[in-house]
Amino acid sequence: MKHFEFIKDLLEKRNIKHSFHKVSSLSIDEIVKSLGIKYSEGLSTLIFRYGGDKYVGILRRDDKNIDSKKLKKYLGTSRVSFASDEELKSIGFEPGLASPLVLDLLQGENKINKILIDESFFEMNKVICGSTSSELALEIKRTDLEKLIPIFERVDIMVPNERRQNVLNDTRKKRILTGDRPTGKLHIGHLFGSLMNRVKFQEEYETFILIANIHALSDNRDNPEKVKQSIGELLCDYYASGLDFDKSTVYIQSEVPETHEIFMYLSNFVSVQQLMHNPTLKTEIKQNNMEDSTPLGFFIYPTHQAADILCVNADLVPVGKDQAPMVEDCREIARKFNNTYKKEVFGQPKAHFGVPKNVPGIDGNAKMGKSLNNGIYLSDSEEELKKKIMSVYTDPNRIHATDKGTVEGNVAFTYHDLFNSNKEEVADLKARYEAGKVGDVEVKEKLFAAMNEVLTPIREKRREAEGKKAELVEKAVEGSKKVSKIARGIADEMKEAMKIEF
Ligand code: ATP
Ligand code: MG
């Protein structure tokens, strides 16, 4: 305990940022699992006896093993062994409870003769190490830890720990990031484009769902009330589509200011010209009549979205096809950042498309959109659904039921393909439509039946969600705190890479 007090005092006096994490076991595997860290972020303090009665303290990154031959050669002796429990106690450590922060003190007291730090230590950013308490692990920045061990010998005596290195990527689940702008209620485009995949993947992936209220303000700045209200609507839609709020982390963009910081750092890796040529952005600027005056906040949203994706280092991004260029840009930005600073801060997030093309609007627009007034919403009543289906865009050149019609680009058939599980019925309708042997009404009535079957349980679950809105908002605020912490870690790694941390 005396060493633990010493460590706490030392960190406070030197004003060094750190945190203690509760652990329930001293096993490295357990600690890595329970804290969700990588082995390469763990650091063990090992004490060896050598040359008779001398002791050496060695810092070992937990994805490495000490190569005993190299160690013996370095120490110039053939006799090196782990210090026994008795020997550890005589030095002042409880077995299994050493900490790098006490090594300097022990060296000063001549209880250990040397401190060896391996090369691999200097590649670390965040370090999780012992605190001399059996219940707490210490998190500290490697550069700060280095300052607290003024006298040591830098060595190259480690080999990879194959087992741990093999599971390096398994220590945390792969991550998903995706989300929506709170600009209204969600529609069937969202359902197929993204929502269904979120539900499908929520067990396998650690899932983060972003409610992008800052993005929403970029073309709704005069309507903050709508954006605020829409947060509740999105939460109900998520719940209705089967998202489990205990498995997935739903969060609110404005509650994670670290993403703005990360955006700023990333913005050096994308050019204005690249954004100007982004096809989705171009279409949206046109649709919003912003060609003469595009708010900067709207113009930069693809890069800000890259910050959203990278702030949790997401692996998979389930989105609609309109977002393909955004995810592509994000991958390029991540690659450029890593290459420029020679540090693998980011992985390569992959887009995952629920449907090969955006779900079209009921008006025939290639994309159904919340802000385009052409959607069938998950919250629509049966009557609204029927009314919308009856007005769905079909083949504009077909006047009579006996005219030969076109199925390609016919929105009623696109919806049939998505919703109607009776594939024979769909094939029959298509054949008769092309032959001029079926009227729009029959096509649409059958479409209504198929869609209503899928949407009824969602509609009912959504009604249930309405009564839980406050609870869901609270979960999203909680989720934001979790994401904020992860994003802080990423922002700090970026700062270190860019040499702007002090
Ligand atoms: P807005 O019109 O306000 O931009 P939106 O309907 O485009 O709203 P967003 O919140 O911008 O919805 O997009 C959320 C996610 O839903 C994105 O991944 C987007 O690609 C996907 N998405 C939106 N519309 C469709 C659609 N029609 N088909 C498939 N996916 C879609
Ligand atoms: Mg959109």
Image (cartoon, rainbow, N blue to C red):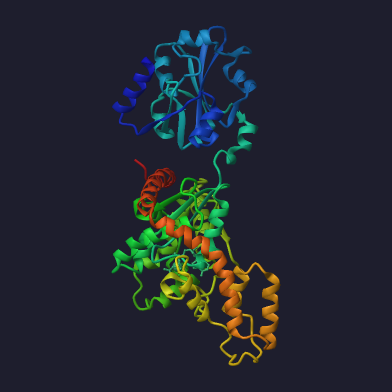
The answer to whether 443 is drawn above or below residue 38 in the figure is: below
Q: Say left or right for 217 vs 77.
A: left
Rendered residue at 64%/32% (across/down):
163
The answer to whether 210 is drawn above or below residue 404 in the figure is: above
Rendered residue at 51%/30% (across/down):
31
The answer to whether 172 is drawn above or below residue 310 in the figure is: above
Q: How many marks?
A: 0
Residue 464 location, x and y as percent?
Answer: 43, 56
> Image quarter for residue 302?
bottom left
Q: Say left or right for 300 vs 15.
A: right
Answer yes or no: is residue 409 visible.
Answer: no
In the image shown, does 187 or 12 lie closer to the viewer?
187
Residue 426 location, x and y as percent?
Answer: 67, 74
- The quarter of the picture where the C terminus appears is top left
Rendered residue at 62%/19% (across/down):
73
In the image shown, does 330 or 424 lie closer to the viewer?
424
Answer yes or no: is residue 14 visible.
Answer: yes
- The quarter of the picture where the N terminus appears is top left
In the image shown, does 468 or 394 lie closer to the viewer?
468
Residue 425 location, x and y as percent?
Answer: 68, 74
In the image shown, does 147 or 187 lie closer to the viewer?
187
Q: Say left or right for 196 vs 235.
A: right
Residue 360 location, x and y as percent?
Answer: 53, 74
